Amino acid sequence: AQKITQTQPGMFVQEKEAVTLDCTYDTSDPSYGLFWYKQPSSGEMIFLIYQGSYDQQNATEGRYSLNFQKARKSANLVISASQLGDSAMYFCAMIFTGGGNKLTFGTGTQLKVEL
Amino acid sequence: EPEVTQTPSHQVTQMGQEVILRCVPISNHLYFYWYRQILGQKVEFLVSFYNNEISEKSEIFDDQFSVERPDGSNFTLKIRSTKLEDSAMYFCASSARSVNTEAFFGQGTRLTVV
């Protein structure tokens, strides 16, 4: 069975510092996609970044980058130059080609950016 | 920028009542989803919908739940007889393709069953 694990329930980072949010996954499916979503306190789910299992390069979107280590089955999110507005819950999610078209989410990491 | 729109943002209902949660997906998307997030817990898949039929559903999506695309723009989730444990944030999402593409989420409907 496919599984997503986020082992950090909460993280603190100082403003302007970089932070890494961990995500590991487990699947035997060779084709899959990895996503990160941000959920601020207002509740909406905001797409941040996507990495395909066959992508050769790590995905980047502005201050977000995904550290994809396929052999280790990890897809950590790196946020550079943290801002106060980055304080939110962050979810790692996965879609499996052999698993239909649904997203499977991890339990999330609550990030707090401090001055 | 196109977005998924959900109404209402918050719904309070009495146990046993029927509720309909409404969503307007992004117009050129073909795949539609409902997810649920109980307060403080992770987001859970409920159902996916394509070509006017359910393509997949989870064990949560029992006979009390149904989905419909009554016209070319709306996508609805109906809960026939709500239970206290149905209290959650319900997210609608849509995507252009079925796999390996991001799903865009609406802002959610917070359902409170009393």
Image (spheres, grey):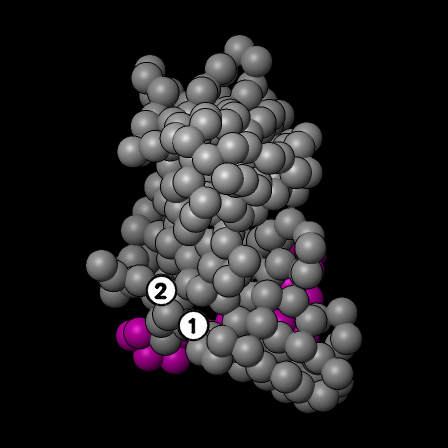
Residue depicted at x 49% and y 15%:
A69
Question: Is there any visible trace of residue A101 in the rendered image?
Answer: no
- In which quadrant of the rendered view does residue A63 lie? top left
- Mark 1: secondary structure: strand
On the image, numbered disc 2 is attached to which residue?
Answer: B4
Q: Disc 1 marks which amino acid?
A: Gln
Residue depicted at x 54% and y 32%:
A13
On the image, numbered disc 1 is attached to which residue?
Answer: B6
Q: Could you tell me which chain the residue with mark 1 belongs to?
A: B
Question: Is there any visible trace of residue B13 in the rendered image?
Answer: yes
Q: Is residue B85 above or below residue A76?
A: below
Camera-side residue: A90 or B5?
A: A90
Q: Can you give x and y, in whole percent of width and height, for residue B77 in the image?
A: 52, 73
Q: Residues within 10 Å of mark 1 (few under 14, many from 20)?
A: many
Circles 2 and 1, Cβ within 8 Å, touching? The answer is: yes
Q: Is residue B81 above or below residue A107?
A: below
- Mark 2: secondary structure: loop
Q: Which residues are magenta?
A: B58-73
Q: Residues within 10 Å of mark 2 (few under 14, many from 20)?
A: some
Residue depicted at x 29% and y 58%:
B29
Residue B71 belongs to the span the image colors magenta: yes
Q: Can you give x and y, in whole percent of width and height, for residue A84 in the image?
A: 45, 45
